[in-house]
């Protein structure tokens, strides 16, 4: 059974969930200069410290490894609707993000950071 127009809704929904859990490589957007990244939160994921931050000129929730060159390796989208997706701008880190549930951890912590910062801004 294919996932075409006549496939059951359950199959299409499962296929969509599987696709959304895979971090996508994005080559058209360059990461910001790390010195201007405002760090909003951090978490340890897969034995690495991961920082979440933003830049005024590029309003996204950027994801970075402090101490590496280049440190910024991607950004999160879909935070407003509560369905975050990871976009990887540095393909050198794509394999790391796909290992052992790291994508889910990056998304979960990023959503927590975004919600906490939103709460602080809204008072």
Image: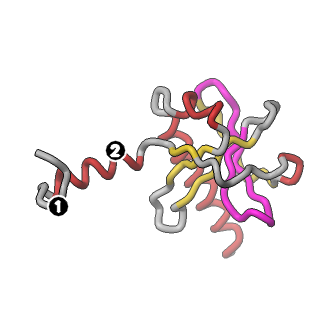
Q: Is residue 19 above or below residue 98?
A: below
Q: Is residue 116 above or below residue 31?
A: below
Q: Is residue 59 left or right of residue 33?
A: left
Q: Which region shows up in magenta? A: 46-64
Q: For numbered disc 1, what is the local secondary structure?
A: loop
Q: Is residue 114 above or below residue 86?
A: below
Q: Quadrant of residue 45?
A: top right
Specify few, some or many for label 1: CA neighbours under 10 Å numbering under 14, 14-19, or 20 or more: few
Q: Residue at x 54, y 61 (%)?
A: 79
In this rendered view, identify the residue nearer to me: 46 or 28. 28
Q: Residue at x 50, y 39 (%)?
A: 103
What percent of the width, then of the height, locates residue 122? 67, 75
Q: Residue furthest top?
A: 47
Q: Which residue is mark 1?
A: 5
Whichever of callouts 1 and 2 sits on the residue coming sooner in the sequence is 1
Q: Quadrant of the C terminus?
A: bottom right
Specify few, some or many for label 2: CA neighbours under 10 Å numbering under 14, 14-19, or 20 or more: few
Q: For numbered disc 2, what is the local secondary structure?
A: helix
Q: Which residue is mark 2?
A: 18
**Callout in the foreground (1, 2):** 1
């Amino acid at each position: 059974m294919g996932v075409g127009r006549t496939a059951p809704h359950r199959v299409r929904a499962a296929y969509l969930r599987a696709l959304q859990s895979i971090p996508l490589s994005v080559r058209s957007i360059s990461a910001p200069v790390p010195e201007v990244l405002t760090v909003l939160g951090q978490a340890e994921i897969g034995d690495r410290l991961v920082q979440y931050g933003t830049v005024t000129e590029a309003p996204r929730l950027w994801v970075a490894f402090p101490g590496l060159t280049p440190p910024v390796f991607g950004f999160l989208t879909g935070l407003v609707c509560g369905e975050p997706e990871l976009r990887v701008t540095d393909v050198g880190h794509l394999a790391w993000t796909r290992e052992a549930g790291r994508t889910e951890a990056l998304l979960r912590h990023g959503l927590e950071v975004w919600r906490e910062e939103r709460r602080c801004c809204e008072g």
